[in-house]
Amino acid sequence: MRQISYAQAINEALHQVIEAEECVFLIGQGITSPWYVGATTAGLIDRFGDKRIIDTPVSENGITGAAIGAALAGMRPVMVHPRMDFMYYAMDQIVNHAANWYYMFGGQMSVPLTIWAIINRGGEQAAQHSQSLQAIFTHIPGLKVVMPSTPYDAKGLLISSISDDNPVIFIDDRWLYNETGEVPEEKYSIPLGKGIVRRDGRDATLVATSYMAIEATKAAINLEKAGLNIEVIDLRSLKPLDENLLLESVKKTGRLIVADAGWKTCGFAAELSALVAEKAFSHLKAPIIRITLPDTPAPASRSLEKAYYPGAEDIVRVVKQMLRS
């Protein structure tokens, strides 16, 4: 099977879905600019024109409201937030409107909207351009949240998100854009709410999201050289969550490490830890460990970024401490 990059996989998904379904259109600021979205939208405006590929002014709240209205009217918009940080401007539209309309209309109308949120961490972008807000949106009833880590999953989950009748927050990370992997040429989908075991293991369960799933796999390979057999689970979908996959793994290994590139306090890693403590506590052989960002804003210094963002080396160190204590 051919290999393509994560960015190319997103681009291919958009080309195929927009071609196949007249109700799908792409809207957002900077969507024709590689500076905003990399290569993920290459060729779209030339192929489909500016009525279906709509590059907007900077107005996060207004654009999101327009996309919600279009979804209520029967369209399936893909709304791009090229810097996830600025989704705060659209919180009223996302949380009070998109997430609630299905319930407030008694199930008679839905909001089939995909909000494509891009994390732009690193590169000295500092506190206002580096935030990873998955925990906030996972907290909101009525929203679904996915975070693919591989090109295969990026294409399949984006297609599934667009097909879903609920508002879906599709979160990708520009640190993944150059990752390559096998991706079928044809259109396919991956069910929302299904995680995947990246590596089987027996000594501990290492659960990760987004780019941390890549780092977790690297760490597991490194730990195998030290004789430690680690099970790596890539959740792929934060809401709905593949709870059974997580709990069965923890019951098998008796240990849990959660690697999530969001903040620690009230973060997604905290939610997973609480879930396992509630439903699999008797199986635990050691305290749960969270590997997250520190509870501080992102630095604007390259040297401080190296200390701020966790990676495979941090995971290796923590797992060894857990298993040898």
Image (cartoon, rainbow, N blue to C red):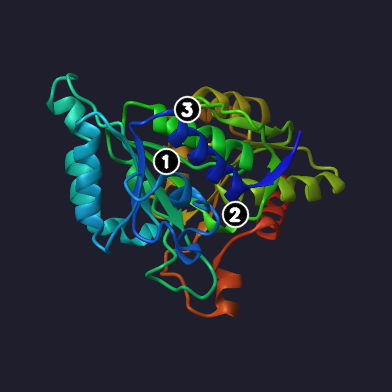
Q: Nearer the viewer, residue 251 or 166?
A: 166
Q: Distance of mark 1 from mark 3, alpha carbons?
A: 16 Å
**Image height of 314 relative to 44, above or below:** below
Q: Residue 143's image quarter?
A: top left
Q: Closer to the N terminus: mark 1 or mark 2?
A: 2
User: Which residue sits at x=22%, y=38%?
Assistant: 70
Q: Are marks 1 and 2 in contact (CB under 8 Å)?
A: no
Q: Which type of secondary structure does the marked residue at label 1 adopt?
A: helix
Q: Which secondary structure, mark 3?
A: loop
Residue 45, image x and y in percent? 43, 51
Identified by mark 3, the residue type is Gly
Residue underneath mark 2: 177
Image x and y of residue 236, in percent: 53, 37
Please name the residue that numbered disc 3 is placed on: 193
Gap between marks 1 and 2 measured at Cα? 27 Å
Q: Earlier in the sequence, mark 1 or mark 3?
A: 3
Sooner in the amino-acid sequence: mark 3 or mark 2: 2
Label 1 sits on residue: 271
Q: CA distance from mark 3 to mark 2?
A: 23 Å
